[in-house]
Amino acid sequence: MLSARGISKSFGGVHALQAANFACERGEIHALLGANGAGKSTLVKILSGVQRPDAGTIAIAGETVDFAGPTDAVAHGVATVFQELSLFPHRTVAENIFIGHEPTGFLGQISQSRLRAAVGDLFASLGVDHIRPNALVADLSLSDRQLVEIFKALSRKPRLLILDEGTSALGRKEVQRLFALLRKLRAGGTSVIFISHRMSEIREFVDRMTVFRNGHHVATVAANAASDAEIVEMMLGQRVERSFPTKTVVSEAEAPLLEVAGLAAGSDLKGVSLTVRRGEVLGIAGLEGQGQGTLLLTLFGAYRRAAGTVRIDGAPARIGTPWQAKARGIALIPEDRKTEGLVLPMSVRENITFSVLARLGRFGFVSPAKERRFVESMMQRLAVKAASMGLPARSLSGGNQQKLVLAKWLETGADVFLFYDPTRGIDVGTKQAFYELIAGLTREGKGVVLYSTETSELIGLCQRVAVMDDGRIAETLEGDAITEENILAASLRMGRARPDEAVVVEAAQ
Amino acid sequence: MTTSRLAARVGAFTKHGVAVSYGLLVVLIVAAVIYNPAFASWGNIQAQLQIATFIGVIAIGQTLVILTGQIDLSVPWNLTFSSILMATLYGQGYGAVTAVGAALLVGIVVGLINAVGVAVFRLHSLVWTLGMNALLEGLTMVYTNGQPPDSTIPGFVRFLAVGHVGGFPVAPIVWAVFAAITIVVLARSRFGRFLYATGNNEPALFLSGIDSRIVYVGAFVASSVCAVLAGILLTGYASQTYLGMGNDYLLVPIAAVIIGGTNIMGGFGGYVGTIAGTLIVVLLQSILSVAQIGQAGKNIVFGVIIIALVLLYAREARPTD
Amino acid sequence: AADKCIVPWSSDTPMVKREAKKGPFKIALSNSYIGNTWRTEMVQIAKSYTERPEVKPLIASFQATSSGNEVSAQIAQMNQMILSGVDAIIVNAASPTGLNSVIDQAVDAGILVVSFDNVVTTKKAILVNQDQYEMGKKWADFIVDKTGGKGNILVVRGVAGTFVDQERTRAANDIFGKHPDIKTTEVYGNWDDGTAQKVVANALAAGTKFDGVWSQGGDTGVVRAFQQAGLKIPPIAGEAENGFRKLDSELKFPMLSIGQSPALSALSIMVALDALQGKEVPQAVSAPLPIVTTDTLKEGTNFFPKIGDSFFTAISIPVCGLDFTAEQILKQKV
Amino acid sequence: MILRRYKSSLLAILALILLLGYYWYKQPLILSPFGFRLLANQGTTLALAALAQLTVVLTGGVDLSVGAIVGLANAIAATYMGDSPFSVVTVVLLTLGAGAGAGLINGVLVAYGRIQPIIVTLATLYIYSGFALLIRPQPGGSVPSYYATTLTGSWGYLPYSLIVLLVVTLLFRLPIMRSRLGTAIYAVGDNPGGAHMSGIKVNRTLVSAYVIGGVLAACAGLFLTAQTTSGDATIGTAYTLNSVAAVVFGGAILGGGRGLALGPIIAAFFISIIISVLFAAGVSSFYQSVFQGGILIFVLMFGNAWTLRVRNRLSVLRS
Ligand SMILES: Nc1ncnc2c1ncn2[C@@H]1O[C@H](COP(=O)(O)OP(=O)(O)OP(=O)(O)O)[C@@H](O)[C@H]1O
Ligand SMILES: Nc1ncnc2c1ncn2[C@@H]1O[C@H](COP(=O)(O)OP(=O)(O)OP(=O)(O)O)[C@@H](O)[C@H]1O
Ligand SMILES: [Mg+2]
Ligand SMILES: [Mg+2]
């Protein structure tokens, strides 16, 4: 179906792809694996005509192609869900899905009725009924946006569908359904290239997989022909055991560091109470979009609080803005490092020092020497991989970017660290480093609130896990009760009856 | 300094078009001198620097504001109003310090209002500062009843604008001092750092626990105060204040900032480039004026040259390239 | 006074006579731009005039408004005047041609329209102005006279694209064109002291030595530019700004100063009142050119040391009995 | 539903209603056929200019050359129009073509030259006004009276200018915005990189938007010509920034992707009519700009405070 040979692409001095080969059969689901920065997305962009390779040839169904732009790729039946969402926030769901090939009628006028019908068909194919076709994409949760993105690709009725971390924000049930559909498409001859950092998904759904490392092709094997450890070794070039650091022991008697009572905000946080002690990691779990993001942003003062109180070390804290939060020792590692965590065009050095700049000089000026020393020590402490601190943050890989976001906060004297899914889209090696960092914080007596979409992380890192449902805490699990099954059950049992509950439970079994 | 840091600096220098704009400035000067050798005379250099000072000082503020991704269209009547206020107060017997102080106070207040509109009410400065300009125009007319005061100007204002020390005009020295301060502030201060961050990605700065509203206040107040300073210098230069004295100072300083390689959407650039931009604009106007083409031709040539310059070095990168 | 004062533009100017109406009259002044001193004085003089004891009984109401430089705003403003049923509209137009259709409408509605200063082209309005060509010519003649018809002349123009600038410059070119030994250099001063000072400084810095200056505005700035360049001030023919004349009274360079008079507004009202009362008036009225030279400068009469530089000194038209003092008009609220 | 869709226009509508109410109280005669015509003619030029501006603003740009194109169109139309219906039609088409050409140059420089729109149009503002000055070094020219009355006259209470505006909006602009090109324009403004990756021809879309903008600005110039029956190269200046103000006031977002035609049209009428209302209210000349600037600032502030109230700070910063 698709064969790419000898593809090279470099950006300035960075060789993203070096004579890489990739091939994918007709009617197969093929995983593309690799650590952050291995060149996966670059290959995807080349296959979809967004970027042009410096060298190499691409053939689709035997025909050599040379895409001048994305339009050409679409014309050849390639549809892609890109890693960076390419949606239009202020257009409706329906318009987004059919952008560029809307059904038209008289005088080229877009036919709203046919558009609605086509969207209805697509939604039915995945059993989606909770998204309104007329809703603005800006109003959707991240997972729903990712669904829209997938529908957008599907609407092209592709011969080759590429999902570049297109499921990273999806809950398990959605992924299950998606793959049910993909299998159907596969039967019709469609090929799928699937990129994900979640090993479980790959194991479960794909036929074959190809591993990239540093822009090179390493191996292509059948899905079950290699063990997890072997795959990780292929990705990283070394063995890495995925293991969680030992949890700090927190005494029940210790006074709470952070106490939250009845916190409500916006339309999706409806009253949450929780406590965090020093040395403790409190996990936040739940299906996507149950108010977890709003909880963290409200605690950090970025969202306006409608009700509730926050106490830190027993004293009431008025936190209405992020600078007040910072002053009270709260740090936030936000959801999207590219748009919320970092100023991508600015240097590594500048990004690391935003939150501590006042300390690195006098009279409003920055002392270059002090700043350099500080940055060097932080880069060392977090093992940030960057050729120089003068490089723009944009040029770093995802994991290293995430380290910059954390570095920014480590020396602000913060006691409470709020993490929003910090390891999303990060490779195994870097994930491991993050686990160690979080454990390190608890050893220093900090308190951590960790929201993660990966249940295994919550199990491995947290002393307690609060499962959220519909803007409230449905259940708090502790100690041995923190298991995959319990978390899933808590996510589903409480709250509104969900029409799709049966499907998911069935799938989970 | 390690070589990689040096390389990074050189890289940044050329990337933002600063080097190119200086290169162009040199080319323009050479062309001008070949066209008319008198361009190289000390008298002409003084005259050009004198005129460049007004634009250059306003362009300081405009650079700061543009770096945040905004623009200040309230300069013309802000400049006029504060200058007239200064001249009136001085004429009424208040001391020079009081008169100049009052003008600067007006600048600060106008800057604050501009900043509040942008930072608190989140209105685009293109419209907000335009409204402010109209408001100030009205206030000027009401305050003066349409007749600016007699032109006794404080002596030191005249000295700053047209005086000489050791055969060198004072005004360009004033400009140089402000320019140096601006460059250092942008490169080395916390405010400068946050200014670039605001222009690039305000939410990220906000989520770093920094109040970006302060950045807007700083930028707009600086811009407004620069407009007032330019007005004061202009008053000294013309030995009088008059209605409409700010009319020439809306678009030209902005053109200087753009030609100097600062990104109009914010986040990139700096005052080093603006200095070249200012000199290019002034020189260009002077050449066009000496070349005796009519106003229509002048407009066309000026527009074409801006486009040509920007095509040379300020083209945007596409997000996916 | 009328025969000396209300003079037809040329021998072929038609006379107009309307049916006499009974006063007092509702009069409106529609001004465009207000952001400079000349326009302010013009409005102030109009107000002063309507308060004169001999005029006041004839006026039921007088309202002056300014619409800014946007033609459609001035059209709206005049429509508004038509709606409120005035007897006469005195107009200083944003564009010489842009108001023609609304003036037609006003005239159709029986309203008298008098256009002055920046006059309109429609024949349905009565025009009151000074002869711009004549002014430009007088300036040029003066320069030719002072330079002996040779040398470099700096021509300081006004705002490009305007009728006034075109007319005055046309006259200058006609005169200078007759003298092959005169070489002119043109700059645009926008009738604005600061701009004029800058462009003149620029021209001087380019090295040419100028033997005379023909300037149609921003003259204070012109003189200052010469001063600042440390040059001897050549003969200058220019407008009637107070600063220009003040400087001449100090420096005594050869000067010819002819001003567009802000009192044209008062003259226009005078003409309007005459026409409304049924007197015959010319369709185009030529107002005299108030000429002042270095020798005829007189403190407190044709220049005012205690008043701002940008003040326009030509505030009176004596032949018409339109004499105003600076104090008198400056106290008028606009 | 409809309310939600037009929410962004609400501020302008409310403001215009209040303004007209007060105007009517001060000057009851505006309820006459003459008054209607007056009101309609007054805002039409700016409304057309605002539509031109809106089209460009939707792509995430801004067109500072709108006023210059209005002036250029006015200069061309009044200089060459002549008297015969044939020459009138020819010159109208020629003028629209000139507008399209001006827009094309803007668009090509933005899309293929990759220069920021604000810079391109700042430069072409000088260029187009230079050409207008070449064509009309001084004000003058004329158009036949039937041309003027066809566009600015009225039939009873129905002003022709409103029909012109409706025709341009509903028969020219709306079909375009409802075609794939229209959604592409919105998409490019909303997320240019995403549009490119979604297979939209970004460059062609940008060029098309600027061309449409140029044609609409030429329409504004043609209407202004009917209103003034003559040409003046400098006449358009005020329309640039006023059109931006109308677009913002009308609820479109500078930065692209959001905005409907209704709001800016209404806002254009508001901005144009204020001056008459101030006159009717007997506000003295000097206070007029105080009021004009003050009202604009106040209304915008009020409108934004109202929408900001319900949103959280972070999403406010993001937009
Ligand atoms: N536009 C660009 N400019 C500069 N460098 C780039 C650009 N795009 C990618 N790179 C670099 O190329 C390399 C490969 O990046 P790519 O995005 O393909 O990695 P990836 O395998 O998709 O990683 P991830 O798992 O984090 O998505 C990285 O080092 C990246 O920093
Ligand atoms: N937002 C963007 N991000 C990345 N690249 C872009 C973007 N917009 C345009 N380009 C680049 O510009 C070129 C042309 O873009 P596009 O195909 O969208 O325009 P087009 O309308 O097809 O142009 P043409 O008329 O030249 O065919 C492509 O090479 C594309 O890579
Ligand atoms: Mg990737
Ligand atoms: Mg990546």
Image: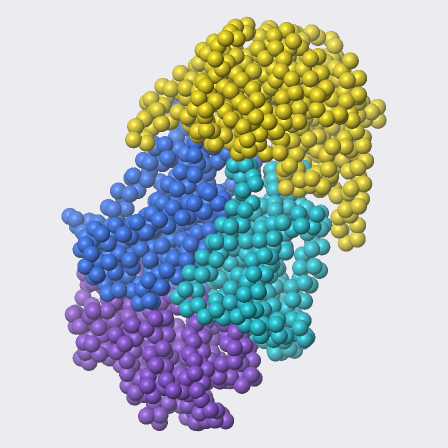
Chain colours: A yellow, B blue, C purple, D cyan
Question: Picture coordinates of residue A390 (x, y %)?
Answer: 42, 25
D182 vs D292, left or right, is: right
Q: Is residue D237 visible?
A: yes
Give coordinates of residue B101: x percent, y percent: 25, 50
Q: Is B116 rendered above or below residue D137?
A: above
Q: Please tell me which residue is depicted at 73% across the width and 8% down the height of the picture.
A: A225
The outermost residue toward the right is: A188
Above or below for B174 versus A242: below
**Apparent side of residue A132 relative to residue A294 in the rendered image (left or right):** right
Residue drawn at the location 54% of the way across and 65% of the way down = D22
Q: Nearer the viewer, residue C151 or C8?
A: C8
Picture residue at 56% right of the left edge, 80% below the top = C105
Give coordinates of residue A335: x percent, y percent.
57, 26
Which corner quadrant holds the N terminus of chain C? bottom left
Is A276 located above or below residue D118 in the figure? above
Q: Is residue C128 left or right of residue C233?
A: right
Q: Residue at x 74, y 42 (%)?
A: A101
Q: Quadrant of the C terminus of chain C?
A: bottom left
User: Observer-nearest residue: C286 or A480?
Assistant: A480
Q: Is residue A403 visible?
A: no
Q: Work out whether residue B178 or residue C114 is closer to the camera in this orientation and state it.
A: C114
Q: Residue D14, percent across and down?
A: 59, 57
Q: Is residue A104 left or right of residue B286?
A: right
